[in-house]
Amino acid sequence: MTRRTVLSADLKERHVNMMAFSACIGFGLFLQSGKVIYIAGPGLAIVAVVLASSVMWSVIACLGEMTALFPVQGPLFEFPGRFIDEAVGYATGWITWFAWVVILSAEILAIAQLWKFRFDEEYLREVGYPDKQLGWSTENYSPAVWVFLFLITVGVINLLPVRQYGQLEYAFGVVKIFFISLLIVFNVVVSAMGKHGNHFWTWNKPYGFSSDTFVVHPSHDADKGVVMTGDSGHFLALWTAITAALFSFVGFETVAVSAAENKDLEKHETIKLATRKLSMRITILYVLGTFVGGLNVPYNDPNLVNIQINSVRAGQNSIFVLAAVRNGLRGWPSIFNGFFIFSATTSGINALYNSSRLLHALASIPEAWPLWLQNTRRRLERTTSRGVPLGTVTVSWLFGLMAFLAVKPFPAIVLGRITNNAVVSELICYAVICLSYIHFYHRIKEAAEDTTLENRAAFNRDDKQYPYRTHGQLFRAYYGFIFCVLLIIFNNWRAFVTPFSTPDFLASYVGILAFFALVAAYHIKSDGYNPLKWRRNASMQIHRPPPKVVVPGRRRGHLIYPQPKEPVWNGENLKALVSFIWGWLK
């Protein structure tokens, strides 16, 4: 009997868009934004978020255009394998898969931390909170309890058929968008009703647009160690803040990971719309969230100092919770912390989805596996009758057991190192994607100019039937590649400053070593042990699968009035306007 090995193409554009959005909105926005403000100051933090957004904007456009034209399974490693080198593609696939199982563990570990919600009584007195105590009674529960319960929840939801899974993710995403929008409004209202008079009091003396000093290894000790000031301090603070902010953006590649489960891309233009919507929504919400959070909490708040550069703590260290506490508001801190748990849970669900689909795509390529694992590969390739890759979901979920590190004495430090390792792995993937696009761009340009090709119009980026393109994309690819490489190299320069931290150094740079080790291993497997004889193996294949084209009259995301000479409120024109607005909002 033939066993099923294909996924079910049941996802709509709205499902894919919200899945990617939900993956980006985990604990990063709610906890990392306070860290960014502490590192750089309220104004410079916005600059850091904008620059981090520009990296996402560049990479997602590269990935989106390639995937829209060739909706392959496993695009994160398929395109590098085609356009750079087969070994680079396989290595990218494995480190990206591992990054996602690490992110799964990080989200579950963060949930365990969020249940330890308790403010110091001394802090509450200092800020004038009306109650002597603020916290949850769950703080003394073993973190292992929460890790177990939420791992089970994440695993069960990923066993749903992809259509039901997509519907659930869409609901999660809608809830997140509404909550974040209300959170922004809440902070604006709190700032307007604040007790400081000046609504930009956190931007003025004794604070400022940027932090006065940058402490390389922050702590509550009297001796702060190495402290940077002046322009060099501001630059290093900005660079460190960009690295911290980037973790919050990890997940946008879900748009491409889910390509094999999308409906007809010619009709729905899923990749194009999801990519553009995600870029706008994430950038706007993160910039506004960072801005309004910085209006109510000074960057030197003691609870922000607690979010040391390589640690992630509980909800009492969130700038949004601190805004409510500093303004004496009851109830809201607990509500916010509860939502942070929900948000981290849904991101964990998405992390398992991404890791399982990446592993399933790798399982379909025998060359990506050693000979002694071929039987395992064939088992992982199988799917259920509803298209769920049960084997890859299970294997990826088992790696989530790393979240039981929450029982260690310093889980916040462990979580910080785990997330830093995942960010570096993702940055390697993003750099490789941008480099792949550069080769892709020149390859399809050659094909569009080749008069011997019958379908050369399909490769013409200026043709109306080309599925997705953006202006200046080649420049953006170079920009994203250079920026990602610099971030990979200097992501944790602090580890080299006295006192040298071996664990932090390994967490930040072992991913680079693993990537090149995997590339070397594949070349040894195919070309032998002599590096001088290694050869680049890039097929530059642009005909399998055939390029997707879109019928010009059915383009979505464009406002075209059926009766251009008639008023906008004409029946058909009004219907087209409403459909256009709804298409960008849903």
Image (cartoon, grey):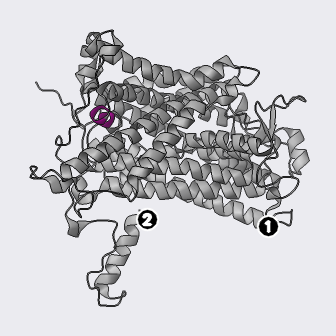
Which residue lies most toward the front here?
Answer: 532
Quadrant location of the N terminus in the rendered image: top left
Magenta residues, start to end: 78-83
Vertical comparison of 117 with 99: above or below = below
Q: Position of residue 23 (x, y in %)?
A: 48, 43
Choose between 256 and 55: the one closer to the eye.
55
Q: Position of residue 141 (x, y in %)?
A: 68, 27
Residue located beneath label 1 in the image: 193
Residue located beneath label 2 in the image: 585
**Which residue does the image show at 88% across and 53% down from the upper left?**
206
Kind of residue indicated by mark 2:
Leu
Q: Is residue 185 left or right of residue 59?
A: right
Q: Could you tell me how far apart the alpha carbons at marks 2 and 1 are, in whole angstroms?
A: 31 Å
Q: Residues within 10 Å of mark 1 (few under 14, many from 20)?
A: few
Choose between 273 and 214: the one closer to the eye.
214
Q: Is residue 2 left or right of residue 113?
A: left
Q: Position of residue 401 (x, y in %)?
A: 51, 22
Q: Secondary structure at mark 1?
A: loop
